[in-house]
Image: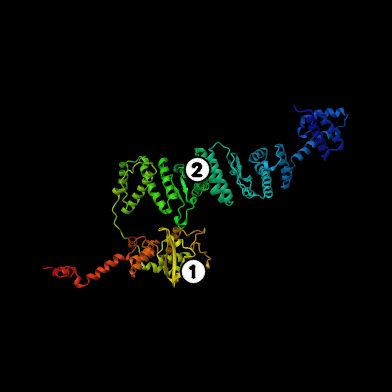
Amino acid sequence: MIPIALRQEYEEQALQQLQGLISDCPTIREDAKIILEEFLIQQGLFNPSEIEENILPSFEKYLDLCGIRAKAKRELYKNAIKKLREYDLTLQFQDVIKDVMECGLEQPISSKLIKFLILHKVKSVSEVNYELREQYEQTIKMPRKNKLQYVKAMDCVKLQDIKRHESLHVIPKRPLEFKEQKLFLLYYPDYEIANSFYYTRDKHELVWDFSIEAPYILKKQIFHMLLYVINNEPAGNMRRERFLLPLKWLYEFCVDTGIEDIEQLELDQIEAFQNIVSEKVVKVDLSMQVVDNIRKRLFLDAEETNWRANVWYMERFHLPEERMNPSSPILRLRFYGITNKENRRLVQDYIQYQIGLTDRALSNIRHKYYFVLQFVKAIEESEKVVVNLTAEDMEEYFRGLDEEKLLPVTYNKKLACIHQFFMFLKIKGWISNIPFLVEYYMKETVPIHHERCVPEEIVKTILQNLNQFPMILRLMFLNLWCLGLRINEVCTLKGNAYFWNDNAAWVKVYQYKMRAEKAIPIPSVLYKVMRDYIKQNHIGPNEFIFKSAKGRAYHTGAFSKQMIKHLKEIGICCDEYAFKSHDYRHTVATFLYAHGASIQAARDYLGHENEQMTLQYLDYMPTKIRNANEEYFGVPENNLAASLKKGGYHGKPART
């Protein structure tokens, strides 16, 4: 029970508010105000919003009691009730009415919108959402063209409110929090983003329903990618066709097929999604990029590294430059080719160890990853699990490996990588013994020399036509031809690489393969050309000299493609000569040795770890041996046939 005193106080306040409201209403005559106030007090109605249409009969009787018979005056007083209600609503909804009127809409359109908002008790435009927009659209019984004008009016009012709200808040914007409800991009709480969707024809594309029954993880993943796209990708058809539409299709596909986690997408699921996409668009590859894009975003943005994700993106690990060659970066490692979940987990743990606990170059880790991956996929053809493999299983696998006719060197590398994988499993305690003896399967290797020197006439033709090449290709080629650098070393040369010391020109090179820096003497002409280029292009000491369009180190693959393209244009890249950048390294090595440099000097210049590797680069060696033989046996006393006739040996008299 409400205390009497409190109730009386409440009624007095309500009465004062009613009297003030009637007194302030500009559209009601003074005599009507007196009649209306007396009637409402008698009825105990102090809140105009509680006045209903069914009160009119009671008001008619009250007018009779007051002796008011004139029809015109009675209508005037009855209209006063309506005007009071309208005035009360105007005061209650003055903010939303003001917002609508400020948009400068045509009168019929603004009136209908205001009426709808008041009917649904919307006192602030900030309360307008997609559900309300749908309801408003359904109330408009007009041809489609006219209906769009009325619905667009609501959109304009909403956008204006978002813009005004932003101008009033100077604090940094917070990321939109995920909620299991519909998200309408046209009403996104960022004016620039929301306004970028205003001219989207099919507004249903802008509706993202996170209220549907679907895995919570999946919805959050889609939401995360959606926010990334609209906040980072420029507005336009590319954003729509490359990101938003494919992302919506992926969301629908995952919901329909019961996929819970996009980072666990399997190959067959990706292929099934691709079939759906192929029915929607012609540029299937463009739309399918969404799978890689969302997996990358989720992997990079996670608070903790998801080592169980089916694809790892190397950017996450922020590896130092010496472990990750900028000219040929390894972007990702995929594990969904391994179908058995236990096998996949073992390989992931092994690669996690390689990345996190060793300092190996990423190219070296990928090398191991490929060999182990091939091994695991091979044993999975017989539905085997790595930890259960026996000596017989391994014997069967190695027999199959023999049938691949691999070179002994390649075979041994593969064998060593598999053995290292098993060593890791044993150390971790997942197996007790390695099921094969690596020494038993190791093959004997015999060095094979390949003639890879670039013919002189080819080099001469290239140099004569080098002025037809773009400047960046000219300079890169000159560094290959003059210095015999690896192509990745050329691509990653920096502004401080060329220097002068002890009256000689030098270049400082970082060898990613050897993970060591070296400095070698270079022709002074090359030094001058490169220093001029660096100065003209304002290249800083730690900037890459040769850059891609994105400002990164020039990609090795891009260099080869561009060289082949321009060589074809001048008619020297055909079946007889296939451009390979590494051939110029062989050419320089052979040139050095042929002109008197020792093998040790050639080794140091090339930056090899040992002389055996350098010997593989000396194409002049077989020719030098052949010429030495011909020179030796060309001397009559060294002629073997003459010696045999004399009964001697190597020109020496026969023993008696």
Whether residue 564 can be seen here = no
Marks 2 and 1, how far apart in space?
50 Å
Q: What residue is shown at x 53% (from left), y 49% (from top)? A: 242
Callout 2 secondary element: helix
Task: Give the color scheme: rainbow, by chain, secondary structure or one colour.
Answer: rainbow
Frontmost residue, 59 versus 329:
329
Frontmost residue, 211 versus 613:
613
Instruction: Name the side, left or right, on which 485 lies relative to 284.
Output: left
Amino acid identity at mark 2: Ile
Please state the horizontal and vertical placement of residue 409, each as a whole percent of the image.
Answer: 32, 54
Callout 1 secondary element: helix
Q: Which residue is mark 1?
A: 531
Closer to the chain start, of discs 2 and 1, is: 2
Please state the horizontal and vertical placement of residue 134, each as a whole percent of the image.
Answer: 64, 39
Instruction: Name the side, left or right, on which 509 lies relative to 130.
Output: left
Label ID, residue 262: 2
Q: What residue is shown at x 28% (from left), y 53% (from top)? A: 444
Please state the horizontal and vertical placement of residue 562, each as a whole percent of the image.
Answer: 45, 61
From this view, report whether residue 513 is shown above or below residue 341: below
